Amino acid sequence: MASSPKVFRTSFHARSISLPSSPHPIIPEVEEILRSLKSSGVASSSSSIRNHLNGLHDLHGCLGDLLLLSETQQLLDKESNGRSVDQILDGSLRLLDVSGVAKDSLFQMKEFTHELQSALRRKGSDAKEAGKYVACRKNVKTSIQKTLRALKHVQATKKEHESLCLLSMLGEVEQVTLSVLESVLSLISGPKDKSLVSKLMHSKSISAEDKNVNEFEKIDAAMRSIAAQKTADISSIQSDLESLESGIEDIEKGIECLFRQLIKNRVTLLNIISH
């Protein structure tokens, strides 16, 4: 990657870390990806989640390149004892924790989905197997909701990094990343309002107003219906399970790529401040 002899213009009055007047190409690239992720709205389907995760991977890849620049490292090193850098380190650990919850939840759901497909092929409509799936889903949702509540608390108490433009950018990257990860967890968990699942249980098709129902919600409704020993279209459910499994695998790959990049960037940050 091409380098610039002067990446940042440093001003130490009021403990300020300023972004340069003529920034290195990485900086506007980071800003552009941030704008794109913010303007794309909340991801509510597997396909939109995948797009958001691809954007996050690019974002943290650029951030990793930015952290490798000597000027960035010098500036962060000068702030290594500051509270703002501690917040950035806390934030990087928080991203790893949340993405870890997403990874674990996706892995469990993939296992449940695979087992359910096998059971349906062997037994057809089986209330016992459906009940096991519903119980497993409840455990996953409980774990996710706990994480989502913790994220709400973080977002309510987090403050901007005053007079620290570079650190403010890092904080903004964290917030955008948390927002996408929150969308991933919300997609897996499904809606808190059970009325939609109940409605789907009693309908044979998805109406126009329910067009945003995702794969998880469809299977949830189908399994609750079977567990209640109602008739079900097994062929349709198997097709939905295949779609769900494919969607899970795609999201899982995106989360795994992001997780590896997050680890890489955290190691770089720790090396900088402990130098």
Image (cartoon, rainbow, N blue to C red):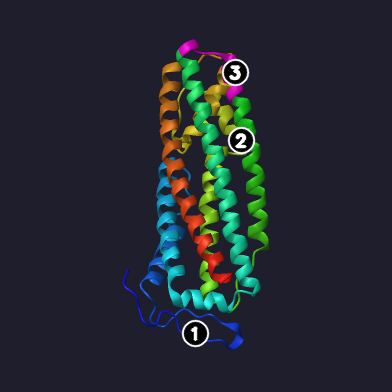
| Mark found first going from the N terminus, 2 or 1 | 1
| 215, above or below 73, in the image | above
Image location (x, y in percent) of residue 143: 64, 40
Decide: marks 2, 1 in contact (CB < 8 A)? no
Q: Can the viewer see residue 202?
A: no
| Mark found first going from the N terminus, 1 or 3 | 1
Q: Residue furthest top?
A: 123
User: Magenta stretch: residue 132 in it?
Assistant: yes
Give the labeled residue for mark 3: 227
Image location (x, y in percent) of residue 51: 40, 49
Give the labeled residue for mark 1: 10
Q: In which quarter of the image is the C terminus?
A: bottom right
Q: Report the residue at 51% width, 21% height from top.
A: 116
Q: Is the magenta stretch mostly helix, strand or loop?
A: helix
Q: Which of marks 2 and 3 is in front?
A: 2
Per the image, label 2 sits on a secondary structure element best described as helix
Q: What stretch is highlighted in magenta?
A: 122-133
Give the labeled residue for mark 2: 140
For disc 1, the neighbor class at 10 Å (few under 14, some 14 to 19, many from 20) is some
Q: How far apart are marks 2 and 1 (CA)?
A: 47 Å
Q: Report the residue at 44% width, 31% height from top.
A: 245
For disc 2, the neighbor class at 10 Å (few under 14, some 14 to 19, many from 20) is some
